[in-house]
Image: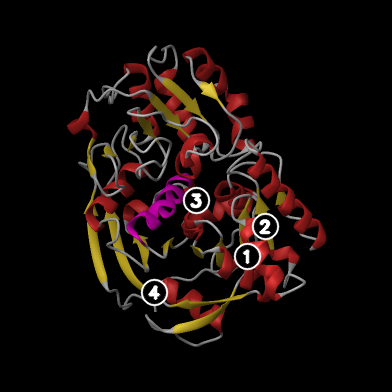
Amino acid sequence: MNITEKILAHASGNKEVHPEEIIEAQVDLAMSHDGTSPPTIKTFHQIANKVWNPDKIVMVFDHNVPANIIGSAEFQKITRKFAKEQNIKKIYTHGEGICHQVLPEKGFIKPGTVVVGADSHTCTYGAFGAFATGMGATDMAMVFATGKTWLMVPHTFKITVNGTLQEYVTPKDLILKIIGEIGSYGATYRALEFTGQTIDNMDVPGRMTMCNMAVESGAKSGIMEPNPAVLNYLKARNVSSFEIYRSDKNSDYEREYYFEIDELEPQIACPHNVDNVHPVSSVLGTNIDQAFIGSCTNGRLEDLQAAAKILAGSRVHEDVRLIIVPASKKIYLDALEEGLIEIFLKSGAIICNPGCGPCLGAHMGALGRDEVCIATTNRNFVGRMGDPKSEVYLANPIVVAASAIAGEIHIPERK
């Protein structure tokens, strides 16, 4: 079996499982946020009175924090009340950060576990060797009530990556390249297993970025076997008592992809689909109105450090709004300590509190008609960040920072 099948076999109490087999899996951790908790709670009240285990539920307010409209305020009020009634202690309501950053940061994610979240980018946690997937409010309500969920064991695509990322090329460019090859629907209900020399040597932020965007190819999950960087990350957070699963050498895969990345250049997803991927060099000079650095894909400290190197001593173009949102409170504090926030402010950027921010077009940084944004986010669908007539390009933090200075899509000159 491969790593995904081994985890699901253990979670379902079976010696082995096979693709397309329907199983009932025990859930190790369930997550919901301020946008998805209320519909989950509404359904939960129709089927149960008490959650199966309050210690295995985490709630994070991140999509509309602080509440920007009455509806958001009411959603958050409902969630806080439910958490108190159910004795759910792991609830973060005061801008702790984006759920997909907060959960690993707080040490809630363990290799070999089954993690479900009422958010599609829950697949981020596959970076730690967990089977992690998103689900809707009805399924999450059943998890809250029973601690179990049914799954069809997915077929797996094996994606082998070898080579070294060159200057100004990041794991974001790699996952964009992969999605461009597979297509937005090419891996529907598949598990993407990332492997190879590049993945073995990749740091935790890069691994999180790649697994985060697995869903953009339609995948059920993205997963990587834990490497030393992951184990050090877990050790630093006193995470213990977990089992590491690794794929058998003779595992069967539905499809295999191979990427050699020594010559990979910065990539960009053009409007209006994540698989509309091209080298950034093909769209240089495209005028922009807004640039955004942040989100659960690229709002980590390493992303801010990369952007700061570009922005230091420079000014954001007078026609561009540059918005920067750290993915968590801890990242914000670290960025303050390192002087990154000062660099951003002096460059003319707007710094916002940790959270999802402009990514979903619901809180701040919304785009007007015919406006163009280049962002480090994970989606660029029609109307994703504002007006349906606006356009969103997806790129790495270095390209976004350089474009904010130039007023158009731009790549810094290599040293």
Whole-number angstrom distance, CA of label 1 to CA of label 3: 23 Å
Residue at image mark 1: 29
Quick check: 354 left or right of 245? right
Q: Are marks 4 and 3 in contact (CB under 8 Å)?
A: no
Name the residue nearer the viewer: 405 or 13.
405
x and y percentages locating residue 311 in the rendered image: 42, 19
Q: Which amino acid does label 3 sit on?
A: Ala
Q: Look at the image and say whether residue 211 sits in the magenta stretch.
A: yes
Disc 1 to disc 2, how far (Cα)? Answer: 8 Å
Give the spatial CA distance, label 2 vs label 4. Answer: 26 Å
The image quarter in which residue 269 lies: top left
Point out the stretch of residues depicted in magenta.
205-218
Q: Mark 3 points at which residue?
A: 229
Marks 2 and 3, how far apart in space? 25 Å
Q: In this view, does 406 lie above or below 335?
A: above
Residue at mark 2: 58
